[in-house]
Amino acid sequence: MATTASQPTSPSNTRLGWIGTGVMGLSMCSHLINAGYNLTIFTRTPSKAQPLLSLGAHWADSPKTVASQSDVVFSIVGYPSDVRHVILHPSTGALSGLRPGGIIVDMTTSDPSLAVEIHSAATSAGCSAVDAPVSGGDRGSRNATLSIFTGGDGPIIEKLKPIFALLGRVYYMGAPGKGQFTKLANQITISSTMVGLCDGLVYAHKAGLDLELYLSAISTGAAGSKSLDLYGSRILKRDFEAGFFVNHFVKDLGICSRECQNMNLALPGLALAQQLYLSHKAYGEGDLGTQALVLALERLNNVSLDSAGGAAASGNKT
């Protein structure tokens, strides 16, 4: 049963759909199922959906089928081209199966212009669309502590707050596309922060400091950051498993760079970080996590933070 325009969502009146059950989507869906929502899911790799099916989710064979069985459809996929395909494809996209009054929420980091296009297409179909990219990584998705940056119509986002509250904290940033602009600014900030974190570690190593003690010492001072808390210890453990893939971060930074060109903005920190992360792709390291940036700096300086040696070249854990 669909909700009315002013009625908040709840498990008793709202059927949910979800497209994309990767690193982030899997945990997010679990929270919704555990809260009692009826959830229909689609993902390109069916095996990735099995844990959710075991929890009671229902499988659909296309985004359109998901939407036909849902009042609110969420998507969190890889690239803007994927977003366009799963939402706007004329024969299999979610919008083609959504009933009037339905809502599409895209949580992928994507082009702001695409968010505006989706909102316009949804409005023309008698539906609503919200751009709601998230920040917080795999830990934030597991712990339901994500920051959710939303753009779209205020009353629709207000209506969705009970769902967003199960995933993290929602921020209403303004008109369609503003959620995406916020996430891109977030990625610009993270990129330079990660460069600083890894620069500091390489410097501290070369200076002969105990790196665990170093991170502990700076974490409570002005150099403390969420990136340090999330990734400092992972870097020291040579844990480069992806909470957020290098490939996806390169995509995000590419979108940021294009938007900067559109705005006539020169952001040298962004440009440096983008080039360093692109070097990971040249080394075949696109499926590592963003904390693997330290490998690029190790190669530049012919050092390894790994006391056992050898792991820096391969990107393997020790």
Image (cartoon, rainbow, N blue to C red):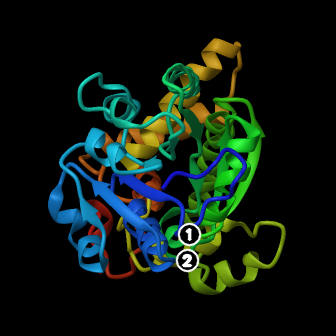
Q: Residue at x 47, y 44 (%)?
A: 108
Q: Residue at x 59, y 56 (%)?
A: 135
Please state if 252 lies on the left or on the right of 42 as rendered: right
Above-or-below relation of 264 to 173: above
Q: Quadrant of the C terminus?
A: bottom left
Q: Residues within 10 Å of mark 2 (few under 14, many from 20)?
A: some
Nearest the camera: 45 or 307?
A: 45
Which quadrant would residue 53 be assigned to in this image? Answer: bottom left
Which quadrant would residue 156 be assigned to in this image? Answer: top right
Secondary structure beneath disc 1?
A: helix
Secondary structure beneath disc 2?
A: helix
Q: Residue at x 59, y 57 (%)?
A: 199
Tell me the residue that label 1 is attached to.
Answer: 140
x%, y% of residue 74?
A: 45, 49
x%, y% of residue 122?
A: 51, 27
Is residue 247 visible in the rendered image? The answer is yes
Is residue 22 visible in the rendered image? The answer is no
- Residue occupying the far right of the picture: 222
x%, y% of residue 295?
A: 40, 58
Above-or-below relation of 123 to 10: above
The answer to whether the residues at label 1 and label 2 have Cβ atoms under 8 Å apart is yes
Nearest the camera: 292 or 199?
A: 292
x%, y% of residue 215?
A: 65, 78
| Amino acid at dot 2 | Asn
Residue 143: which numbered mark, if any?
2
| Amino acid at dot 1 | Gly
How many marks do you count on the picture?
2
- Cα separation, mark 1 vs mark 2, equals 5 Å
